[in-house]
Structure formats: structure tokens, C-alpha cells
Image: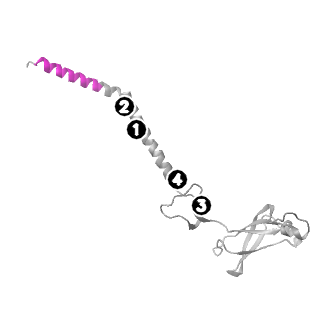
Amino acid sequence: MEAVAPQEYDSAAAMAASRHESYLALARGTRPEEIAAARAAVEQVEGRLRYLERQRKESVIVAPVRGVIQTLDLRPGDLVAPRQAVAVVFEAGPAKVRVYVPEPRLGAIRVGQSVDLSVDTYPSRVFPGRIVEISSQAEYMPRNVQTREQRNDQVFGVKIEATPAPELKPGMSVTATIRLPEAAR
């Protein structure tokens, strides 16, 4: 057996005790200060992630309807204010036409009624449509209606939905002929 100097023994004993304490600390878990520091670091990174996700979400332009973009009024690098229009979108689906019916003729039309539509591009062709909405309020009304003739100045907006056809394009001028029942003519 070999003799060990008391200093070496004390040094080895101190190291063993230190390593035993390290072992016990690891076995018990990390100190509260280290846990708090780690939580703070995680919260900071999560905050940065939320900020970047919000930035990403705000950089996406979403149209309120499905459709085809006709014009895009943006260039790379342009800044856009919230709710600022940046494109003209033609809504997908059936074409819609707005016509105006004089007040005296309003009683002869109803929602669901058939309409013949024609466009200058195809003069011999009739495109079918139907009335989908009749405005409940007069438009283009004079200040006061005093005579029977002035009643014709009151018109009501009527929305017509055309049966889909590839020949009909947004912005075309349309002539609408509302098919009136025999009794209304």
C-alpha cells in the first residue's frame, strides 16, 4: 500500500465532494435561475416567431372573392396600406348585368323571370339570363314627382345573372330584353 500525502488526500476528497454535488444537482434538476433564464430565452424566441408570422400573414394579399385578376396596381417594393385596393378582380361565375326599369313597368317583372341578353359582338345571338334581384328603392328620382310623366323618371335597379358563356366578357355592353308575361304587355 502506498502512502498519500494529506494534501493530496484533501484535494481528492474535495474534488470527489464537488463532483458528488454536481451529480446530485444534475439528478435533482437544473437550478431555478437557469430554468428562469431558459424560459425567458424561449419566450423571447416565441415572441420573435409570432412577430415574423404576423409579418408573413400581412404580406399576403387576399381577394374577397374568387375570380380572375384583370389589373394589378403594384410593383415589387410598393408599400400597401390596410384595405387599399391593389387589383381589379373579375368575379368568377356567371356574368351579372345591372339594368334600370321605370316605376310604371315594375309590376310586370319578378325575381326568377327570364331575360334575353344580346351584345354587339354577336348581334344574331341571344344569351339567356334571369332576374336575380330587384332593388327595393327607386334611383334617379327627381326631387318631387308631380306629374304622371315624371313617374317614368323613377327607376329601380334590377340585377340579371347571365347563363355562363365564354363569349361574354366583363365590361361588354349588353342589351337586356325582359320576357314579359302576356297579361303584362
Determine which residue is flagged by label 3.
Answer: 85
Q: Which of the 4 quarters of the picture holds residue 149?
A: bottom right
Residue type highlighted by circle 1: Ala
**For the residue carrying disc 1, how many other residues have a C-alpha within 10 Å: few (<14), some (14-19), or many (20+)?**
few
Horizontally, residue 152 falls left or right of residue 82, namely right
Classify 124 as above or below 136. below
Residue 8 is a magenta residue: yes
Q: CA distance from mark 2 to mark 1?
A: 11 Å
Residue type at the position of mark 3:
Ala
* SS assignment at label 4: helix
Could you tell me how far apart the alpha carbons at marks 4 and 1 are, in whole angstroms? 26 Å
Residue 58 is tagged as: 4
Q: Is residue 159 above or below residue 168?
A: above
Give the x, y percent position of residue 154. 83, 66
Mark sitting on residue 34: 2
Residue type pointed to by label 2: Glu
Q: Confirm or deny contact between disc 1 and disc 3 (CB under 8 A).
A: no
Residue 103 placement (x, y as % from top left): 85, 66
Mark 4 vs 2: CB contact within 8 A: no
Residue at image coords 14%, 19%: 7
Look at the numbered disc 1 and give the secondary structure of its residue: helix
Identify residue for label 1.
41
Name the residue type under label 4. Answer: Glu
Query: Which residue range is magenta in the image?
Result: 4-23
Name the quarter where the N terminus is drawn: top left
| Residue 12 spot, x, y in % from top left | 17, 22
Where 156 falls versus 174 (above or below)?
A: above
